[in-house]
């Protein structure tokens, strides 16, 4: 850890109050959802931090609170030395030049009535940047994200999902930010397109020196993209580690369960998927003690009363932290094996039989 | 097809063609799809958006609405062509013999009726039973699919159920008449991975209990790997590769399947760079000429632009629709057969640079 992270989030809370209306308020029947409940993490310059968790884990709310798209209830968000939570709206708008977001669903996050050129140009207009050279910059940005600039006067519906996500990325890049939040940027895309967008983000990060907060529910995607990973459950970070360390040596029982449940595209592994019973509890009525205890295969009596803090994992490397009181009792190295070599070779373009092997007439006849 | 089961398939789909006639043009949603489903197995139909996999399922049950039309092909269920059945006949087949379970449990359940009512109604549609018996059966089914406290939850409304529980309720509805075949269209796509695993466990148990054959439609190769016995890979409205699940993941024969295998991010692999399939998924109103994958295919040659390859056996028990796949038969007799099968002008034979067949 350096002493000068780009982003430093400390004790972030976001509560939503649910009162269905007048009567509820009259009766004081407010219910508080602790969507983000004391989250702290740093992101180093040039780094990609992954935020992973199931629905209801609070990962998107965390990102939105960091950007103040949702006002944080409590906590500080220090961006390059400035506490974002203390900024006025005007100052925050100014700050948004440096912080951009790419959304999950490129179909709904792009204005249908505007051409993609106008969409990409808009952030420059809002921030009064690149006067007189905006059109040229739109062309340049489109090229950067792999879209033909001559398409700039087309509308979003004329593009495929993957292309629309490229438009979303070009829009985020328009103001030359140094920090981008990517909120499930590939989960709405087809498998064969996902890899294109992930590679593009990787290229852009290099080219523009970007720092990324990458939110995803898919741990396989996270593994390819992120330098460090924070695993969230019910509004809290339960494990935080370097990506390599997290995947080779997961410590929190929830992380292990998640890894075990993932259907890997390898039949012998996929058939051994482990079932984690139960569901994420309602944040309106979270369990006492460790919020994972009702589903945890390792839970003891103590877990129902002690709320564990995110602490360093003894003997582990790279700032590995976990929030589990039993963490010292678990074996190390129970993660997923690395098998990159085999896969690369087996499905390589070179290993495809390009020459058709002609079979005899007789064989062809019973093919009906 | 020696590697496939010997008995007659439960379902035999041949050359199914379904089109949608829209203002923007004709959508070739299903463009000559062929596959079989055997007794007690789970067949995966895997494909991306625009592969026609969902419309294939709807077509099998004659559930395609205007402007869509099933143009040709056959869907033989235990020897009987379903496409020749009347709507009344289909109504007794749907749910009873072949049940379908859809992707989105929120839109498939009616918010103003209790979950129990909706399951009971399905039972009473197909069976002559009293309200009381239907309710009892409903509670039994809810327990069967792993809904906790079914005696009280039977009176809950859909919004009181979590996503996973709603999907279980749909499953209860689908199996309520103990169907012979269950078609599950992306049954876990909207769910978290831990819930998905639970649902597939339940599905597994039910398949064993009721002896169902299952068609699982999905975009997720991981789900296919963990759940299916055999796989049909769909692209551009048709099946481009069919194989047993182990064989498919061991050595995919069609360049598209190989491209998919290369491009999926794997948990076991930490390389930064992925290998995408270049280009975009095809637009079904404007499919490329020849092999519809050729614009994206790293192996495409000039022939691929004009020659539309049929799905053919490339080794016992496996089929692929690619001129360049090893074992793909380009001998004159195979081409003759194909020409005879095609209505009117058959495809022209490509220049075979491999010389005369033995």
Image (tube, coloured by chain):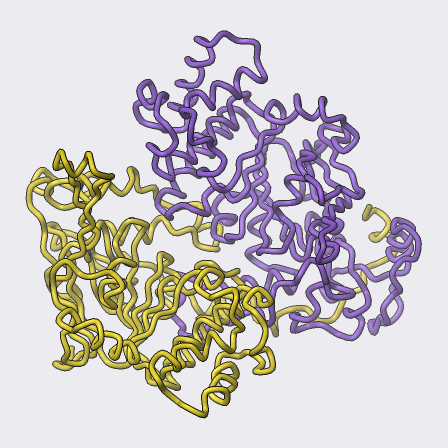
Chain colours: A yellow, B purple
| Total marks placed | 0
Residue A200, horizontal then vertical, whole percent: 46, 76
Residue A323 visible in the displayed image: yes
Residue A241 to residue A276: above or below:
below
Between residue A25 and residue B237, name the one nearer to us.
A25
Please state the horizontal and vertical placement of residue B238, each as a whole percent of the image: 70, 52
Q: Using residue B60 as the reference point, say whether residue A334 is left or right of it.
A: left
Q: Relative to A44, does residue A27 appear above or below in the rendering?
A: above
| Extreme-bottom residue of the structure | A132
- Location of the N terminus of chain B (image quadrant): top right
Q: Is residue B44 left or right of residue A362?
A: left
Residue at left 30%, top 81%?
A178
Instruction: Name the quarter where the C terminus of chain B is drawn.
Output: bottom right
Q: From the viewer's side, name the closer residue of A11 and B112.
A: B112
Q: Nearer the viewer, residue B120 or A313?
A: B120
Is A155 situated left or right of B29 in this image? left
- Residue drawn at point x = 38 percent, y = 78 percent: A123
Q: Position of residue B321 (x, y in %)?
A: 73, 58
User: In this rendering, does residue A331 appear at all?
Assistant: no
Q: Image quadrant of residue A101?
A: bottom left
Residue found at x 64% / y 40%: B57
Q: Nearer the viewer, residue B111 or B46?
A: B111
Where does residue B336 sit, x and y in percent of width and height?
Answer: 91, 55
């Amino acid at each position: 850890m350096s002493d000068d992270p780009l982003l430093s989030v400390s004790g972030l809370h976001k509560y939503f109050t649910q009162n269905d209306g007048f009567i509820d308020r009259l009766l004081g029947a407010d219910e508080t959802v602790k969507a983000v409940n004391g989250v702290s993490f740093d992101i180093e310059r040039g780094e990609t931090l992954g935020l992973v968790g199931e629905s209801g884990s609070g990962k998107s709310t965390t990102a939105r609170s960091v950007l103040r798209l949702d006002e944080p209830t409590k906590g500080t968000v220090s961006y390059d030395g400035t506490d974002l939570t203390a900024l006025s709206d005007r100052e925050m708008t100014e700050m948004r030049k440096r912080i951009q977001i790419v959304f999950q669903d490129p179909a709904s996050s792009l204005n249908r009535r505007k051409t993609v050129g106008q969409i990409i140009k808009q952030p420059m207009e809002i921030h009064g940047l690149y006067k007189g050279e905006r059109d040229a910059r739109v062309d340049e940005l489109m090229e950067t994200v792999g879209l033909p600039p001559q398409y700039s006067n087309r509308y979003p519906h004329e593009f495929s999902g993957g292309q629309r996500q490229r438009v979303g990325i070009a829009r985020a890049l328009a103001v030359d930010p140094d920090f981008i939040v990517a909120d499930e940027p590939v989960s709405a895309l087809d498998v064969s397109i996902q890899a294109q967008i992930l590679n593009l983000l990787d290229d852009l990060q290099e080219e523009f020196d970007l720092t990324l907060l990458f939110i995803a529910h898919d741990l396989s995607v996270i593994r390819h993209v992120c330098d460090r990973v924070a695993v969230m459950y019910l509004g809290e970070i339960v494990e935080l580690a370097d990506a390599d360390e997290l995947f080779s040596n997961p410590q929190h029982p929830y992380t292990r369960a998640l890894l075990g449940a993932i259907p890997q595209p390898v039949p012998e592994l996929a058939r051994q998927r482990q079932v984690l019973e139960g569901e994420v509890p309602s944040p309106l009525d979270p369990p006492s003690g460790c919020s994972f205890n009702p589903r945890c295969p390792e839970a003891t009596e103590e877990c129902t009363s002690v709320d564990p803090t995110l602490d360093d994992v003894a003997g582990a490397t790279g700032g590995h932290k976990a929030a589990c009181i039993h963490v010292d009792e678990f074996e190390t190295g129970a993660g997923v094996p690395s098998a990159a070599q085999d896969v690369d070779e087996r499905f390589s373009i070179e290993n495809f039989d390009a020459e058709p092997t002609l079979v005899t007439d007789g064989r062809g006849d019973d093919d009906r | 097809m020696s590697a496939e089961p010997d008995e007659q398939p439960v379902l035999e789909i041949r050359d199914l063609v379904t089109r949608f006639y829209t203002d923007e043009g004709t959508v070739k949603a299903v463009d000559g799809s062929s596959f079989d489903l055997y007794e007690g197995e789970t067949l995966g139909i895997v494909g991306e958006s625009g592969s026609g996999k969902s419309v294939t399922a709807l077509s099998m049950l004659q559930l395609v609405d205007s402007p869509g039309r099933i143009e040709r092909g056959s869907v033989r269920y235990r020897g009987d062509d379903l496409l020749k059945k009347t709507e009344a006949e289909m109504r007794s087949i749907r749910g009873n013999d072949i049940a379908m379970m859809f992707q989105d449990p929120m839109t498939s359940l009616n918010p103003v009726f209790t979950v129990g009512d909706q399951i009971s109604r399905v039972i009473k549609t197909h069976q002559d039973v009293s309200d009381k018996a239907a309710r009892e059966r409903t509670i039994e089914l809810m327990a069967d699919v792993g809904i906790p406290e079914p005696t009280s939850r039977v009176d809950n409304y859909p919004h009181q159920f979590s996503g996973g529980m709603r999907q279980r309720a749909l499953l209860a509805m689908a199996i309520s008449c103990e169907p012979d075949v269950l078609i599950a269209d992306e049954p876990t796509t909207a769910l978290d991975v831990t819930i998905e695993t639970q649902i597939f466990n339940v599905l597994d148990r039910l398949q064993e209990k009721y002896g169902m054959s299952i068609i699982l439609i999905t975009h997720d190769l991981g789900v296919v790997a963990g759940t299916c016995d055999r796989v049909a890979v769909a692209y551009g409205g048709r099946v481009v590769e069919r194989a047993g699940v182990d064989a498919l993941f061991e050595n995919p024969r069609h360049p598209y399947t190989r491209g998919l295998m290369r491009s999926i991010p794997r948990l076991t692999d930490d390389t930064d760079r992925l290998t995408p399939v270049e280009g975009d998924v095809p637009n079904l109103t404007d499919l490329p000429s020849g092999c519809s994958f050729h614009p994206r295919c790293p192996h495409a040659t000039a022939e691929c632009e004009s020659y539309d390859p049929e799905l053919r056996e490339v080794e016992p028990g496996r089929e692929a629709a690619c001129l360049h796949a090893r074992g793909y038969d380009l001998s004159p007799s195979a081409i003759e057969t194909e020409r005879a099968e095609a209505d009117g002008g058959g495809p022209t034979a490509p220049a075979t640079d491999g010389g005369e067949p033995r």
